[in-house]
Amino acid sequence: MFAANPPGAKESPPRERRFIPDEELRARLARLQAAMADEELDALLLYGAQRRAGNLTYLTRTLPGAGDAIAVVPRRGPVELISQTVKEAPGGSRPEAAGVWRPPLSVNLRAVPGSREAGGAPAAPASLGEAAAAAAQTLGASVLGLVGVEEQMRGEDAMVLQAALPRATLRTLTDWYEALRAPKGEPELRLLRRAADLCWEACQHFADLVTRESSLRKIGAEVERVIYREGAEAVCLLVTLPERAAAAGQALRLQPAPPTHLVFAEAVIAYIAVSYQGYWADRAQALPMVPVEPRGKEVRARAESALDALLALFAVGKPLSEFTEEAARQLRLALGPYPRADFPLGNGIGLDLQEWPLLGSPPRSAGSRLRENMILSLRLGLPAAGDSAFVSRMVWLHRSGVHQLYPRF
């Protein structure tokens, strides 16, 4: 189950991520605008929604509220954040006292005409695409980069945006932008370490509660209660019963925790992700319900060995295309008699659960490379009759090597 806010939370305006300082935001904006100049872009449009907001949050330190938002980034000057849910805080008032969010110093906030304050009814239909286009026209932008627009924006808003800019050159640059923000700075690394601590605690708590008499849904609710109390903002729990998939010859598929008990289960695989101050950490673990047979131990050891072999392939500066080819060869050698591995090999993780790059898939850009200070989530599932394994790693790519963010299970 994905939760954008803890249970019972009401509709809210964009929320500020308070642990990222203004000077860090200004440095990010300066790096981005320098890269925009190299690409000869006049402006960049960054779209974000509550469920997938990383591209927007990275530059504005905010999460959208119930509505969508788009940031208009000029080649020079501050960012303009256009929101459907709030109005700018009155000058000099404290956001907490006013009940209205105030943007960081590098961002100007503007509401879409006819938009609503949090919890209020919309005054009139508003088009985020039209508002963004008007802001781009005000800048005199003729070459615009689009981030998240084609992939996430509602079709109607996207068409309005494109129709309002008939003479502009529009370039989809989501991968380009996500590659720029993939290396994590020290403020981000601190938040990711805290998210990792909370995720580890959630996994341990889940493992302590699982028995054949337990309900997965009730366990999930208890884990959420504990982790929210520790400061988490969102928790995702997905499970699968591997013997059912193996018996049916199907791939392992994770799904929200069902209300059923585990009376006849031989094992349960749990994937848990936790968000802290907008940053995600995740883990997967396989928990046996019966004594593990030697074959089961061999399957788990095979999966662990295969994932460790992949870790040895990471190196700062290595082209993603080269890593993808090496990983495919290494998996064929490491898996031995197992015909396939389930689940994508892995991806970047941070402000979104799935960020650039998607490992194991051909890179969209020929020049894409692994970068220092990337955080990667790796996972490997091996389906085998009665003895499926699921292992994962969350790692930090550094010039000195690959460092794991957790001890092993």
Image (cartoon, grey):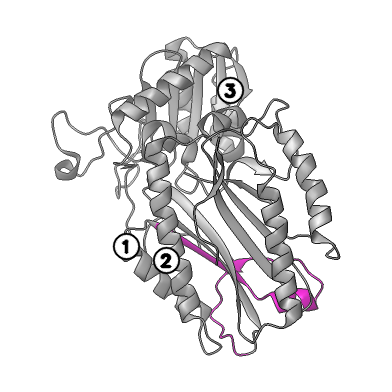
**Secondary structure category for the residue under label 2:** helix
Residue 78 higher or lower than 109, as above or below: above
Residue 21: percent from left, percent from top:
30, 33
**Secondary structure category for the residue under label 3:** helix
Residue 33: percent from left, percent from top:
46, 17
- Residue type highlighted by circle 2: Glu
At 23% from the left and 41% from the top, the residue drawn is 100
At 82% from the left and 47% from the top, the residue drawn is 329
Q: Give the numbered dot on residue 201.
A: 2
Residue 331 higher or lower than 67, as above or below: below
Of residues 86 and 340, the one drawn nearer to the viewer in this rendering: 340
Would residue 388 be found to the left or right of residue 134 on screen?
A: right
Cα–Cα gap, marks 1 and 3: 47 Å
Residue 34: percent from left, percent from top:
48, 15
Cα–Cα gap, marks 2 and 1: 10 Å
Magenta region: which residues? 234-263
| Magenta-drawn stretch contains 258 | yes
Residue 240: percent from left, percent from top:
64, 72
> Looking at the image, is mark 2 or mark 3 nearer the viewer?
2
Among numbered discs 2 and 3, the one appearing first in the sequence: 3
Q: Give the numbered dot on residue 163.
A: 3
